[in-house]
């Protein structure tokens, strides 16, 4: 990162909790490559912190948790190598969240859209404010979730609910998300972070059992490597379709896309 550029994240400690805030409200708290690297570095730095019992990821500004990647910047991607480099960094970040020894909580005060939804479901628990919304609109851009969110969604809420959510490509409310198991707790507006902090503060169990529980649950869920590779290949194939390029152009030009099925 340039020394003159603002840091894309902020960190703060609250008792036994580390709060990592994506601090790009001007960009919908989207995850750029710099942001992905900064998040990864912050997570790596706290892996062996015995004084921490959990990590919370949230977004600055109150309006957005995270809106995924930078659609306008992605228009510059023209080769599979560039695609793998750009999206590989975030896929690695989300795997690091899943494999982190501490529980990672998402505090969703605002919109969690597209890749923002993928970030949220990579976390272990999700606390969502009543007026917040979450959704996976990738199909409207002619693609599927690019950060291996499809298999995470299936594991989290089941095949049929994942199918409906991805094909509808619309946002749902916190109450709807709670009803299908997409989030774990709904709070009053602006209260997601406070609820996540209270959860960690209330973990009155042995610190090693916290890490052991996460490790055991991860092992019980199985290894998603095969499905991750498959969905990455599908995503790459769809990325270079005419419909995806049309959707990108329509997004920038603020018009409805005209899809042709190719």
Image: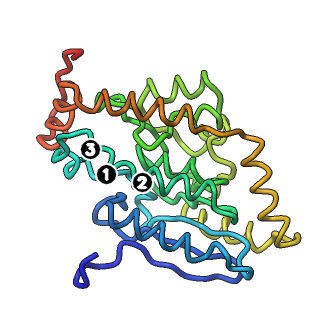
**Is 51 situated above or below 223?**
below
Give the Cα separation between the discs numbered 3 and 1: 9 Å
Report which quarter residue 47 is drawn in: bottom right
Question: Callout 3: 10 Å neighbours few (<14), some, many (20+)?
Answer: few
Q: Nearer the viewer, mark 3 or mark 1?
A: 3
Is residue 23 depicted above or below 29 in this figure?
below
- Name the disc covering residue 235, or none: none
219 or 239, which lies in front?
Answer: 219
Q: Secondary structure at mark 2?
A: helix
- Which is in the foreground here, disc 3 or disc 2? 3
Q: CA distance from mark 2 to mark 1?
A: 8 Å
Crowd tier of the residue under label 2, counting other residues whose Cα lies within 10 Å: few below 14, some 14–19, many 20 or above: many
Would you say the residues marked 2 and 1 are in contact, meaning their CB atoms lie under 8 Å apart?
yes
Question: What is the distance, in whole Å, between disc 3 and disc 2 at their CAs?
Answer: 15 Å
Image location (x, y in percent) of residue 101: 69, 64
Residue for point 44% across, 25% down = 168
Residue at the spot of label 3:
81
Quarter of the image that includes the C terminus: top left
Tag 1 secondary structure: helix
Against 12, residue 174 (above or below) is above
Q: Position of residue 88 (x, y in %)?
A: 39, 50
**x then y, percent, for residue 179:** 67, 36
Q: Which residue is mark 2?
A: 90
> Disc 1 marks which residue?
86
First in sequence: mark 3 or mark 1?
A: 3
Work out whether mark 3 precedes mark 2 in sequence or the reverse, and give the earlier one: 3
């Amino acid at each position: 990162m340039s020394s003159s550029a603002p840091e894309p994240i902020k960190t703060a400690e609250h008792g036994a909790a580390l709060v990592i805030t994506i601090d790009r409200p001007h960009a919908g708290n989207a995850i750029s490559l710099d942001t992905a690297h900064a998040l990864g570095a912050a997570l790596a730095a706290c892996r062996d912190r015995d004084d921490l019992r959990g990590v919370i990821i949230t977004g600055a500004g109150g309006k957005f948790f995270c809106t995924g990647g930078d659609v306008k910047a992605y228009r510059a991607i023209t080769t599979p190598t560039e695609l793998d480099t750009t999206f590989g960094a975030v896929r690695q970040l989300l795997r690091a969240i899943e494999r982190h020894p501490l529980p990672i909580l998402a505090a969703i005060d605002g919109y969690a859209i597209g890749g923002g939804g993928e970030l949220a479901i990579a976390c272990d628990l999700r606390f969502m404010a009543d007026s917040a919304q979450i959704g996976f609109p990738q199909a409207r851009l002619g693609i599927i979730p690019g950060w291996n969110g499809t298999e995470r969604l299936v594991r989290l809420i089941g095949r049929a609910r994942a199918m409906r959510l991805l094909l509808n490509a619309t946002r749902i409310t916190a109450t709807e998300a709670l009803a299908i198991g997409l989030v774990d707790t709904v709070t009053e507006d602006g209260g997601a972070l406070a609820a996540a902090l209270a959860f960690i503060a209330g973990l009155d169990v042995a610190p090693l059992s916290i890490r052991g529980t996460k490790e055991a649950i991860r092992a019980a869920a199985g290894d998603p490597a095969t499905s991750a590779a498959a969905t990455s290949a599908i995503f790459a194939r769809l990325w270079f379709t005419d419909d995806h390029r049309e959707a990108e152009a329509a997004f920038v030009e603020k018009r409805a896309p005209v899809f042709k099925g190719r």
